[in-house]
Amino acid sequence: MVMYVDLLTRALGRGDQRRGFDVDLLLADLVQSRARLRATERELKTPVAEALALELSYDGALIRLCESLGVPTTPDWFANPVRERARLERELAARGMALSSERELLPQHT
């Protein structure tokens, strides 16, 4: 998975360019990326390159949102993307962004 980590690092760009985004915009980007990823998971004929691009898009959105909320993360921790995705999704849930039954991130109302 070293190649995936390298691709994800390149997709995110330089660290200083990833700062200063609005959390609402980052959340919207994450929800859209997740919806696109979930839509292709049900499609058996999705080209490998497209599936990889969608995973990179989702993981990049996940990293940017988590960084903005102070959740420790780095592309280097995506050597096992499924495990790191799950960890970050749990961290977001702990901060009030729970997964709905449709598996989309939604802010929890208190």
Image: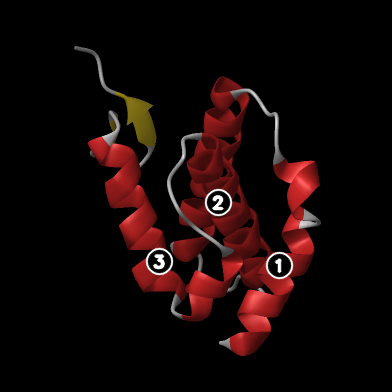
Q: Mark 3 points at which residue?
A: 84
Looking at the image, which residue sits at the far top?
A: 110
Q: Residue at x 63, y 79 (%)?
A: 4
* Location of the N terminus (image quadrant): bottom right
Q: Mark 2 points at which residue?
A: 63
Instruction: Say which amino acid is labelled 1.
Output: Thr
SS state under label 2: helix
Mark 2 / mark 1, whichever is N-terminal: 1
Structural crowding at the residue carrying mark 2, measured as other residues with C-alpha within 10 Å and reported as few (<14), some (14–19) or many (≥20): many
* Location of the C terminus (image quadrant): top left
Q: Mark 1 points at which residue?
A: 9
Mark 2 / mark 3, whichever is N-terminal: 2
Residue 68 versus residue 10 in the image, above or below: above
**Total number of numbered labels?**
3
Location of residue 96 (image quadrant): top left
User: Is any atom of residue 77 visible in this view?
Assistant: yes
Looking at the image, which residue sits at the far left?
A: 110
Q: Where is residue 51 in the image (x, y as percent from the top left)?
A: 61, 69
Instruction: Say which amino acid is labelled 2.
Output: Ile
SS state under label 1: helix
90 with respect to 59 (left or right) = left
As measured in the structure, the alpha-carbon distance from the residue carrying label 2 to the one carrying label 1 is 10 Å
Instruction: Say which amino acid is labelled 3.
Output: Glu
Q: Which residue is drawn at 35% across and 71% down?
A: 83
Q: Residue at x 80, y 44 (%)?
A: 17
